[in-house]
Amino acid sequence: MQGNEHVRYLIAVVMVVLGTWTALAAQTTASRNMAVEHAWARASPKGAPNGVSYVTLVNKGADADRLIGAASPVAETIQIHEEKTEGGVSRMRQLEAIDLPAGSTVTLKPSGIHLMMKLKQQLQEGQTFPLTLTFERAGVIEVTVKIGTVGAMDDMSGM
Amino acid sequence: MKQETTTRESIQAPTASGEPRRLRFAWGPAAAIVLLVAAIGSIAWLHQRSAPTLGGPFELIDTKSGRQVTNRDFPGKWLLVFFGYTHCPDVCPTTLSNIAGALTKLGPLADRVQPLFITVDPTRDTQQVLADYTAAFDNRIIGLTGTPDQIAAAANAYRTYFARRQVGDDYYMDHSATVYVMRPDRTYDSSFLTTADSSEIARSLRALLQ
C-alpha cells in the first residue's frame, strides 16, 4: 500500500518533470519551424545613434515565411537594411521583409543584410539584450542578442 | 671579361644569353616560367603605373586635435584615406575595425601609417561625435570633418562619390567603398576595397613599409 503510494508519487514527479521539460522545449525556438540562431550585435561607439544586429534565420518548415518586423527595448525602431557595394559604391536600402522559402537559411551579416537599430542606449560589449522578431507565419520569436566588439565580424570572437 | 659575363648570364638568365646551344633541355620550361612571371609582373607594374592620379590638396579639421589640417600634414607617413559617416551602421564599422586590426598586426610599423576617416555627413558628424566614433575603433585613426564645401573638395580630389539617400524618416549616405593608400610624398600608391579584411590590409601595407 505504502509502496504503491511511493510509486504513484514517483510517477507524478516524473510526469511533472517531463511536462515542464516538454513545455520548455516547445518554447525554445529550435522546436518551431522557424529557428533564430547566432543573434549578435556590435557594441556601439559612444554617441553613435545607430546600432546593428545580425541573426541567422532557418526555416525548417514546409511553407515559405517572411521576417516582417523586429523590435527591442534598446531601440526606438528597427529596420531591415541591405548594404550593397556596386561599382565601388556602398549603398543602403530598406527592405520591407526578408523572404524565407521553405527549408532555407538566411544569414544576416556585415556587408549584407542587417537589422538597423535606432538606439535608445549605447550597446556595451559583453552585454546582451532581447530582440523580438515577427514572422508572417511563425509569429513572434524572442531571442537574446550577444553584444560583441564595435567591429565584430561574427558572433564568435569579434575579429 | 666578356667570357665571364656570358657565363654568368647563361646561369642566371639563360633566355638572355643568345647562345641557345648552351641551354640544356631542363632550361626550356624554366625559361618559359621566368618569361611568364616577368610578363605578369610587367603587366601588373604597368597597370599600377597607369592608375589615375588620385589625391590632392584638402583642408579639413582634425577632430582629435581640433586643428586645421591639409594633405601636407602628417609628414613622413603613409596615409590611408577613406570616406564614411558615423550613422553608417554596417560598412563603416567594418572598415574601421579592419583598419584598426591591421594597425595592431603591423606592430611598430603602424607608426608610419596614418588612417584618415573623412566624413561625408558633416551636418551630423560634428567634431566631438566623429572623435568619439573613431576612438572607439582605434585612437590612431583620425576623423576629419569640415564645411560641406571642404568635404566636397576633398571628395573631389579623391574622385570619391557620395550622395544623400532618404530612407523612411532618416537619411543615409551612399559613398565610395575604397580606401586610398597615399605615399609619404602624397602621391597615390594603391587602393583597396572596404571589404578587405585586416590580414589582407596588413599584408599589403607591410610590403610597402618594409
Image (tube, helix red, strand yellow):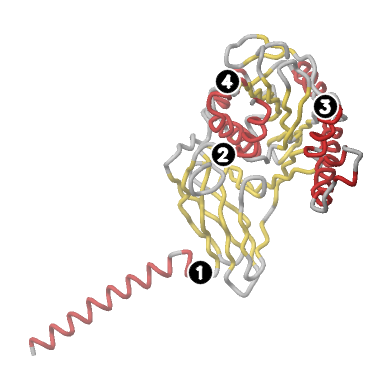
Q: Are marks 1 and 3 in contact (CB under 8 Å)?
A: no
The residue most toward the top is B67
The residue depicted at 61 percent of the width and 32 percent of the height is: B99
The residue depicted at 45 percent of the width and 52 percent of the height is: A144
Q: Nearer the viewer, mark 1 or mark 4?
A: 4
Q: Which residue is mark 3?
A: B159
Seen in the image, is B69 located left or right of residue B15?
Answer: left
Q: Residue B180's quadrant in the figure?
A: top right
Q: Residue A102's quadrant in the figure?
A: bottom right
**Considering depth in this image, is B187 or B4 the residue closer to the camera?**
B4
Q: Is residue A65 above or below residue B42?
A: below
Q: Tell me which numbered mark, 3 or 4, is placed earlier along the sequence.
A: 4
Labels 2 and 1 in the same subunit = yes
Q: Are marks 4 and 2 in contact (CB under 8 Å)?
A: no
Q: Which residue is mark 2?
A: A51
Seen in the image, is A16 located left or right of residue A36?
Answer: left
Position in image of residue B209 (x %, y %):
65, 25
Q: Tell me which numbered mark, 2 or 1, is placed earlier along the sequence.
A: 1
Please, what is the three-letter code of the amino acid marked with disc 3?
Answer: Arg
Please, what is the three-letter code of the amino acid marked with disc 4?
Answer: Asp
Disc 1 crowd rating (10 Å Cα; few below 14, some 14-19, many 20+) is some
Position in image of residue B120 (x %, y %):
72, 26
Mark-to-mark CA distance, 2 and 1: 28 Å
Q: Which residue is mark 4?
A: B111
Marking on residue B153:
none
Mark-to-mark CA distance, 2 and 3: 29 Å
Labels 2 and 3 in the same subunit = no
Q: Which residue is mark 1?
A: A32
